[in-house]
């Protein structure tokens, strides 16, 4: 079975839960005391998708403004970008729109964009209506999903949706014995998230 390496980056404001989503996806773990990411973290996870295996090479970027200039290293060559906002923070949704603009102007032309509204376990203090976020995602042909890294809601589904949007290989037998790389790696060193 062909293994495809798919570079995926997570973008979004600090504190929205990017690292928590990645930790939930890769390690099925949630850390209430997780530290802000410095630079970026790198993790991988392989999932089946039809007749292929998708090995996600996940770059979890730091949301703090001082790291913004590093972001192009992570979204360049990415097959997909997950842009995360916090449903309880309207500001984080405005930041998401800036990321969408930046990706459109400087990101790969055919990048799959997924919008994740995280912390949906905190619906009682919600500031971003789901309808508004969904309509925005539709307007830019992006995947949309609300997640809770804390309660393990829709995290697997987020990556499944991305997998389904990646076009299958036209000629899989050519790649059956080696990895197919839909990625270009940054050269910077990395830390693991958790
Ligand atoms: N209630 C709730 N809290 C969450 C959820 N996901 C993350 N958090 C909390 O939100 C805070 C920030 O989470 P991080 O995963 O570090 O956020 P981040 O986006 O990686 O932040 P940076 O690395 O600074 O960019 C932590 O206290 C988490 O425990 C969630 O789904 N629900
Ligand atoms: Mg982080």
Image (cartoon, rainbow, N blue to C red):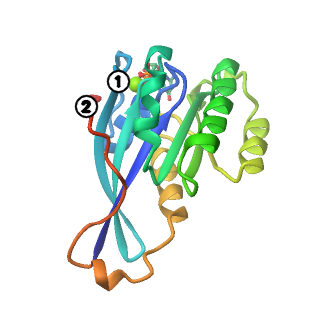
Q: Give the residue pinned by disc 1.
A: 39
Viewer-proximal residue among 10 and 46: 10
Left or right, 1 with respect to 58, comes to left
Q: Quadrant of the N terminus?
A: bottom left
**Could you say which disc has been placed on residue 60 in the image?**
none
The residue furthest front is 106
Left or right, 167 with respect to 90, comes to left
Gap between marks 2 and 1 measured at Cα? 8 Å
The residue that appears at 76% across and 41% down in the rendered structure is 136
Look at the numbered disc 1 and say if its residue's Cβ is closer than 8 Å to ligand 1: no
Residue 145 visible (yes or no): no
Look at the numbered disc 2 and say if its residue's Cβ is closer than 8 Å to ligand 2: no
The kind of secondary structure element at disc 1 is: loop
47 over 124 or under it: above or below: below
Decide: few, some or many residues near mark 1? Use Cα within 10 Å; few <14, some 14-19, many ≥20: some
Left or right, 92 with respect to 43, comes to right
49 over 31 or under it: above or below: below
The residue that appears at 23% across and 31% down in the rendered structure is 189
The residue that appears at 31% across and 32% down in the rendered structure is 41
Decide: few, some or many residues near mark 2? Use Cα within 10 Å; few <14, some 14-19, many ≥20: some
Q: Quadrant of the C terminus?
A: top left
Percent x, y of residue 35: 34, 16
Viewer-proximal residue among 29 and 193: 193
51 over 6 or under it: above or below: below
Q: Give the residue pinned by disc 2.
A: 190
The number of numbered badges drawn on the structure is: 2
The residue that appears at 34% across and 19% down in the rendered structure is 38
Percent x, y of residue 92: 63, 22
The kind of secondary structure element at disc 2 is: loop
Percent x, y of residue 56: 35, 52
Going from the N terminus, do you reach mark 2 or mark 1 first? 1
Residues under numbered marks 2 and 1 in contact, where contact means CB atoms less than 8 Å apart:
yes
């Amino acid at each position: 079975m062909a293994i495809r390496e798919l570079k995926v980056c997570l973008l979004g404001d600090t504190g929205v839960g990017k690292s928590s989503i990645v930790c939930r996806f890769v390690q099925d773990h949630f850390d209430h005391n997780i530290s802000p990411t410095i630079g970026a973290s790198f993790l991988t996870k392989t999932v089946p998708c039809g007749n292929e295996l998708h090995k996600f090479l996940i770059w979890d970027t730091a949301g703090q403004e001082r790291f913004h200039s590093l972001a192009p290293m992570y979204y360049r060559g990415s097959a997909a970008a997950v842009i995360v906002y916090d449903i309880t923070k309207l500001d984080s949704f405005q930041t998401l729109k800036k990321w969408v603009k930046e990706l459109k102007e400087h990101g790969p032309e055919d990048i799959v964009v997924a919008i994740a509204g995280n912390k949906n376990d905190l619906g009682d203090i919600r500031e971003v209506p789901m309808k508004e976020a969904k309509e925005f995602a539709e307007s830019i042909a992006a995947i949309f999903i609300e997640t809770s890294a804390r309660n393990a809601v829709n995290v697997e589904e987020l990556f499944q949706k991305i997998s389904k949007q990646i076009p299958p290989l036209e000629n899989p037998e050519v790649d059956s014995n080696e990895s197919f790389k839909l990625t270009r790696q940054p050269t910077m060193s990395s830390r693991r998230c958790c």
